[in-house]
Each structure stands twice: as structure tokens, then as C-alpha cells.
Image: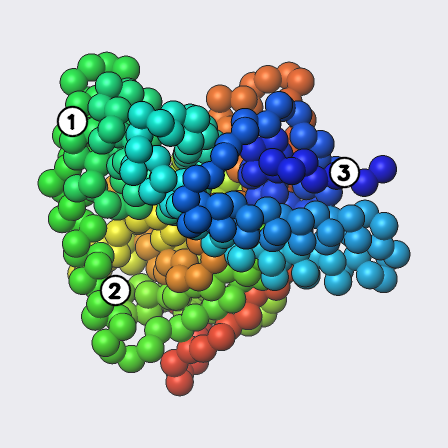
Amino acid sequence: MNPKLHPFLLIALPFFMLVAGLQSFAYAQPSRTPLKIDPKTEEFKAAVDDFREVMKEMQSIATHYNTAKKGQVQKWKDKWNEMYPTVVQKFHKMLQAGSMEYAADPEDSLVIASWLFKIASQETEEDRYEGLLPILETLAKDKPEFVEAQRLLGVTSFALSEYERGRKAIDFLANGDQYPQLKIYSENFDRLIEERDREMQARKQDAEGEPLPKVLIRTNKGDIEVELFENHAPETVANFISLVEQGFFDHKGLSGVKHFAVFGGVEEMADAPPYTIYSEREKEGARAFLRGTMGMTLTNPESPDSAYGQFFFTLLPNQELQRMHTAFGRVTKGIEIMAALQKIDPREEEKEDKKKDQPDEILEMVVLSKRDHPYIPNKVK
């Protein structure tokens, strides 16, 4: 039996079910009583209607996927991946319109405030932060006593490296012991800004110079485009491009750990390339690990010169990674796809009844552009 859309799908069927992918969404059933929202402004009404319509299209794709013959399944998977960025865009537009309606009359819009907060809580828990800052700033400003809204503002501003926008919330919460991570954030505030600014300057210089190599990562959730830091990590980039052109990463898994990173490539050493490469983490101008930065996993945590056939995307800024790992690229398109990739929650790993999550898949990697010279790995001797 095919699932049916509830009129208030945006509430009754959580957005994370769509993010989980076509197969999960196709069999999802609304499990909660919908929170009734009655938009008053034309902007909010239009945004809700637009989102509902695009979700109906996704439901239609899911229905066709359910009933498709074997030869037609891929067609509907491709349509799903093609539509997904549009859904995310309209979702954020709807949230922004709801936030504006709430800001115009906070006392008469408490249901909207509750709705926005629930969605923001859900999004941040799943490492999806884009588009949330203006909403959380509004909630935190109008309800300063709302401690959880302050926390979400702090976490989101940290994730997006918009540190100044969460400073008041962080300082407010860092006074106690309830949020140790935010306390660390507060204590390292100036250093974080310095690293962020240095990285932004490097990106500006990259844009003004010779074009950097670009690689398309096609996954079962959609496409991710990355830019590779050849100016600062040429050997790591050479190795990565060499592996991509060999098809090494094709049909390998993608999975990660919440609030840390998503890993792609080999999982077993037996499948790894028969060599490692030298670290470039101590080179002048070594890049920072912000959200969406790429690094290479090490076979030996004690040896920086042991990167091999697994890479990762950072979900949050991470200063500690720079001590051992080389940052060699960043996501430039498809950050919403990166955020939607399968992640485990370390807090649930030990549960005996936990269902084993299946990793997502790299369908194909394609070098979109590169510089006019050979890309040959410099192997550790």
C-alpha cells in the first residue's frame, strides 16, 4: 500500500524522513498529530503552499518508485535526486517566512514559535544548519530566557563559523557546566575567528588565481561538488585525483558520525591502495577544517604520513584535526547532500537492539576540471 500525504505533511511527516532518502520516505507513515498552523501573511501562505506542492511531487516520485518495474527504478531515483535541492530550498524559504511572521507579532504567534523551534531542534540534531541562523536569532532575541533556543543559536553559529552571531548565547551558557562543548567554544573564541578569517582569505586568493581542480561526487542521495586545495596541499590533491581517475572510489560506502564527520572510500585495509602519502599539514598556509572541509583518514593515528584510500567531510569546525590531518578540499555545491548522508549516533552504538544502518554509496566520481600537468602520488618511501 502506498503512503498518502497528510495535508500538513511538513509537520506530520518529519523532514528527516525525506532526507533519509527515497526508500525510507516511500514507506514512511505520519506518526504524529499535526501541529495546525494558520499562516496570516501572504508570504508565509505562499511559502507553505509552495513547499506542500513540491512535497506532493516527491510523494508522486516515491509512489512511482514503489510500483516501478526493475528497469524503471533508476529513473525514479534520478528524479528524486534531481528534485531534492529544490525541496531543501523551498523548505528554508518556508521557515524564513514563518520566522518573519513570528517576528512581526511574537505574542500572537506562539504556535509558529513552537513549530520553528521543533524544526530547528531536529535539523541541528541531524547536522543540518544552513538557513537556521536568522530563525534562531529571532527566537533567542524575543525569548532570552528560552535556554534551549540560546543553545541552538550557539551550536549553529559555531557550525557555520558565524561565531560573532552566537557570542552572546555562548557566553550566557558557558557560565555553567551544562554545556561543556560551548564552554570550550567560548574559551577559544578569538582563535576560532582568527582561523576562520585566515581560511576566508585563502579562499579569496584561490578565487583570484589559477582555477583549482574540481571533482563531482555522485551519491545515491544526490551530487556533491568539491574544490581541491592544490595551492596548499598539492601532493594530497594529486593522490586524490589519481584515485578518482582510476575509479577507485566508485561504489564505495559513505557514512559518518553525528556532529563530527562523514567518511568515504575503503573501510578495510585489504582494499586500500598499497601505499600511503606524506602529510602536508605543517606546510605554510595549511588550511583550516571548517564545515564541509575534506581531509584524508590515517592508517596510523600516530603517523601523519599514513593517509591512504579513505577521505572525510567535516560536519563541524574542528581545530584538533589540524594537528594530524591535511585539509585538501571543500564542498562548494551540495552541502545539503553532505548533511543528508548516513550518520550514526555514538550515544546509540552500544544499544543491543539498534538496527544496523546501511551506508550510503558513492555511485561515481568524476574530475570536472584540473590543471595541465600529471597528477601522480608521491608515495611514502
Farthest-out residue, bottom: 372
Query: As displayed, is residue 249 above or below residue 318?
Result: below
| First-in-chain label (1 vs 2) | 1
- Indicate the quadrant containing the C terminus: top left, top right, bottom left or bottom right: bottom left
Residue 302, horizontal then vertical, whole percent: 35, 40
For image coordinates 41% across by 44% down, the residue present is 41
Cα gap from disc 3 to disc 2, whole angstroms? 46 Å
| First-in-chain label (1 vs 3) | 3
Residue indicated by mark 2: 203
Residue 368, horizontal then vertical, whole percent: 49, 75
| First-in-chain label (3 vs 2) | 3
Of the residues shown, which amino acid type is indicated by label 3? Pro
**Contact between labelled residues 2 and 3, with CB atoms less than 8 Å apart:** no
For image coordinates 67% across by 49% down, the residue present is 56
Judging from the image, what secondary structure is the residue with disc 2 in? helix
Of the residues shown, which amino acid type is indicated by label 2? Arg
Cα gap from disc 1 to disc 3, whole angstroms? 46 Å
Residue 226, horizontal then vertical, whole percent: 43, 63
Of the residues shown, which amino acid type is indicated by label 1? Asp
Residue 300 visible in the displayed image: no
Q: Is residue 267 left or right of residue 93?
A: right
Query: As displayed, is residue 248 above or below residue 213?
Result: above
Residue indicated by mark 1: 171
Q: Quadrant of residue 326?
A: bottom left
Residue indicated by mark 3: 3
Residue 102 visible in the displayed image: yes
